[in-house]
Amino acid sequence: MVKIVTWNVNSIRMRTARVRALLERHAPDVLCLQEVKAADDAFPSQELVETGYRSEVYGQPGRNGVALVSRESLTDVVRGFPGDPLPDQARVLSGTLRGLRVVTVYVVNGKAVGTPEYDVKLRWLDALVAWLSAGHDPDDPLIVLGDFNVAPDDRDVHDPDRWRGSNLCSDPERRRIGALLEWGLVDLLRLHDPGPGPFTWWDYRDGAFHRGLGLRLDLALGTRPVAERCRSVTVDRDERKPTFGEGKPSDHAPVIVTLA
DNA sequence: ATGTCACTTTACAAGTGA
């Protein structure tokens, strides 16, 4: 079995105690982190070593930042990807565990439809699709996990009519996710759960978590060989509760994937 | 109900990004 967890932590420094607790609770082989929001040398590697994990970090000061935390060493670790239109932003990190290529991504947020930031998001997604499809084989074992900042379809939205056409749910973004699926990736959660829901993100504002106003933005996409091995995909919703664990929660909940 | 959180800096308050 291989267990992989992905979680947008919204600052590793604010979430170190919760990350350690999560490693002990789920005992994953790999934990993918997004929005680490720290430079490499500010990542709490030693605190995670104490729980039995080593870290590969692609960070930058203050924003973005991704990491792969694992018990075994990963091989062929690569920071970023060729053709990235935002090469100064730390958003993609790849490594191999026992023949499985693991890619973690933190997709551009996009702010709002019609803004320059939204156009950058679409171009960045185009580059991600181009790199994955040109540089990989859909018959090889590959899993892409992270915060895609896109709710793939209406089942992933608490109120699809209210969100339709807005950033995180708009058709152009959804078409980019669709392009990944057409290339050969499978939305692993939907193998096991027809929806609607579950959600993985709730805005900090408006009491959104308490009111159930969530989206599914955190995805695990696998090639066919990975989909055939996939036994479960679940969301650790407890982790989003303010009363759960030490300190404050991230605005995202972790997604747990198990492969045979 | 734009009601939060975490980052940064011309830092002890305000702007940015999500």
Image (spheres, coloured by chain):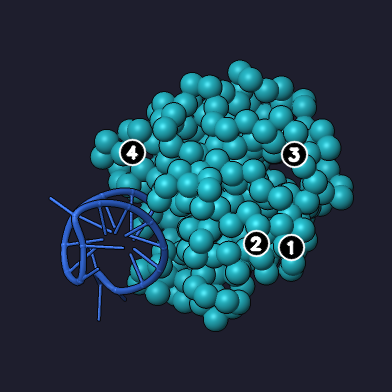
Q: Secondary structure at mark 3?
A: loop
Q: Residue at x 58, y 64 (%)?
A: A16
Question: Quick check: A254 above or below A86?
Answer: below
Residue A129 in percent (x, y) is at 54, 27
> Given the image, on which type of amino acid does mark 4 rest?
Tyr
Label 2 belongs to which residue? Answer: A47
Residue at which label 4 appears = A118
Report the Cα–Cα distance between label 3 and label 1: 17 Å
A59 relative to A3, above or below: above
Residue at the image position 43 percent from the left and 61 percent from the top: A159
> Which of the two labelled residues, at mark 2 and mark 4, occupies the earlier sequence position?
2
Residues at marks 1 and 2, CA–CA distance in whole angstroms: 7 Å
Q: Position of residue A250 (x, y in %)?
A: 50, 64
| Tint of chain A | cyan
Of badges 3 and 4, the one in the foreground is: 3
Marks 2 and 3: CB-CB under 8 Å? no
Residue at image mark 3? A74
